[in-house]
Amino acid sequence: MRNKIVAANWKMNLKLSEGANLVNGILQGMPAISENCKVVIAPPYLHITQTIAQLKGIEHIFTGAQNCHSENSGAYTGEVSAAMLADAGVQYVIIGHSERREYCNEDSALLAKKVNQALAGNMHVIFCCGEPLEIRDANTQNEHVARQIEEGLFHLDAPQLKNITIAYEPIWAIGTGRVASSGQAQEIHAYIRKTIAEKYGAEAADNISILYGGSCKPSNAAELFACADVDGGLIGGAALKAEEFLGIIKAMVDS
Ligand code: 13P
């Protein structure tokens, strides 16, 4: 059975004390979850050691980073390497988020190097893909997303793929309140799984978790997570309030 994952991407939000309160609130309300369910919290870098300390010894809930650098060390002012994150105890790294692709000009070649760095640190990668509105309007989203996955991930071998989770996040749904319908999500998630199957075989495709992200909330999570190829969510705005994030975790547990 493949893993179900709900991951919080706090983006550039919350002061340290606010982050600590949010994690406490999540821990207080965490439902019992089964072995194949996982929760990831990816705060800003500054919070990471605090979050790791809060989550220490607690099963099924892990600390993630929102990014890592493409090089191991060196004169890269303001950057943080995957090796540093791994050493601090980070278990997941989000790579390829559309905001970093757009605002930081991160292209596929750079993202492939970041994936390699994260895997070298024995961390698990949440690799993001997703199309802008004009691509959806032209109905070429499948090709767009398949290309992002091929360019970012297909240099990996099959054992490495076991440490990859894919997050499909249509850009037109991120922070807009406009969620993909469950039909739209299922269709493209199935296409992503088929793309993986063609390269790595049916078993690898069956085992990889594919998350949906983009205006996911407690009110729509159950319907999205009920789709056969939707294995959880990558959550932005609704992950900044314990009650809302817990509602999405519960939807995963019940799915
Ligand atoms: P929202 O949930 O705020 O739409 O953000 C989604 C996202 O970008 C998560 O990485």
Image (cartoon, helix red, strand yellow):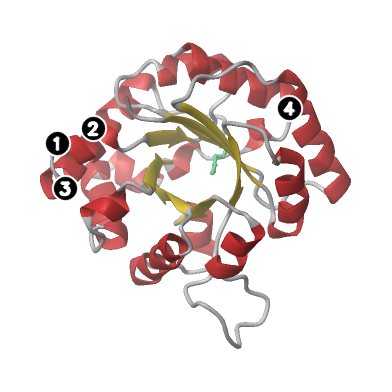
Residue sitting at x 34%, y 19%: 227
* Cβ–Cβ under 8 Å for marks 4 and 3: no
Marks 1/4: CA–CA distance: 36 Å
Marks 4/2: CA–CA distance: 31 Å
The residue pinned by badge 4 equals: 27
Earlier sequence position, callout 1 versus callout 4: 4
Tell me the kind of residue under disc 2: Asp
Tell me the kind of residue under disc 3: Tyr
* Residue 205 place in picture, x, y as percent: 22, 38
Please give the label number shown on residue 200: 3
* Cβ–Cβ under 8 Å for marks 3 and 1: no
Residue sitting at x 84%, y 41%: 18
Q: Quadrant of the N terminus?
A: top left
The residue pinned by badge 2 equals: 206
| Quarter where residue 232 is shown | top left
* Residue 163 in sight: yes
The residue pinned by badge 1 equals: 202
* Residue 94 place in picture, x, y as percent: 50, 52
In the displayed structure image, the side of residue 71 where residue 8 appears, left or right: right
Q: Quadrant of ligand 1?
A: top right
Please tell me which residue lies in front, 136 or 49: 49
Residue sitting at x 28%, y 35%: 207
Q: Secondary structure at mark 3?
A: helix
Marks 4/3: CA–CA distance: 37 Å
**141 in relation to 37, above or below:** below
Earlier sequence position, callout 4 versus callout 2: 4
Q: Secondary structure at mark 4?
A: helix
Marks 3/2: CA–CA distance: 10 Å
